[in-house]
Amino acid sequence: MRPAVARAFGRRLIAALSSLACAAAAHADPLGLYIGAGVGAGQIHLDQLSFDEHQTGWKAMVGLRPIHVLGVELEYIDFGHPNATTSSAQVDAHVRGAALSALLYAPLPVPDFDLYAKGGFSRLQTTASGALSGVGTCTINDPNCALFSFDRTDTHFAFGAGAQFKIAAFAIRGEYQHFESDVGNPSFWSLALTWSF
């Protein structure tokens, strides 16, 4: 094979292999799929009972980032299970639910760092039980005891913002989220780890 022909063949072969490598990489992760989990501090509000407590909670998520500046994420959040005595009641509360959000990433010139905002809708289940303070001795057999229990599920707007630092296929992210609810507006600060396929 003549040198000029060999060089041309080599260039074509390298170009073909590069194209195949790029196609394989794109095929392996065409949508930017990732999964993750985190822990954080949930703040639970119950407006009618003047209940406002912080509790350790957790979250799990799955997301897609098909282009650099846009993504979508589905997550499940458990805000924790606090109990406390307020001025009006002894309360045991629990908030949990799912959220679907669109993410908008800032076009930063730093490849391993992201700032993002997110907005979408959440479906939260809020349960609470307890007794009104100062009414009876609050035993099951006491007819004067004002026991209460409610279970409310609603769908409302949710939004948040965060930052993440990527290390290979992993990312460490810190995030704040705020949720609207008929019974009070909970929020969640979290630290999470994600893994991209």
Image (tube, helix red, strand yellow):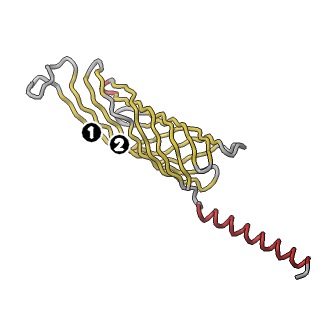
As drawn, 141 above or below 30: above
Q: Secondary structure at mark 2?
A: strand
- Name the residue that disc number 2 marks: 154
Quarter of the picture containing the C terminus is: bottom right
104 on left or right of 56: right
User: Which residue is drawn at the image coordinates 30% and 40% (left, top)?
Assistant: 152
160 or 15, which lies in front?
15
85 on left or right of 54: left
Hey, which quadrant is residue 121 in on the image? Answer: top left
As drawn, 94 above or below 138: below
Q: Secondary structure at mark 1?
A: strand
Hey, which quadrant is residue 80 in on the image? Answer: top left
14 on left or right of 29: right
User: Which residue is drawn at the image coordinates 27% and 39% (left, top)?
Assistant: 151
Which amino acid, mark 2? Asp
Q: Residues within 10 Å of mark 1 (few under 14, many from 20)?
A: few
Q: Residues within 10 Å of mark 2 (few under 14, many from 20)?
A: some
The location of residue 62, given as percent across then percent down, is 48, 51
- Name the residue that disc number 1 marks: 151
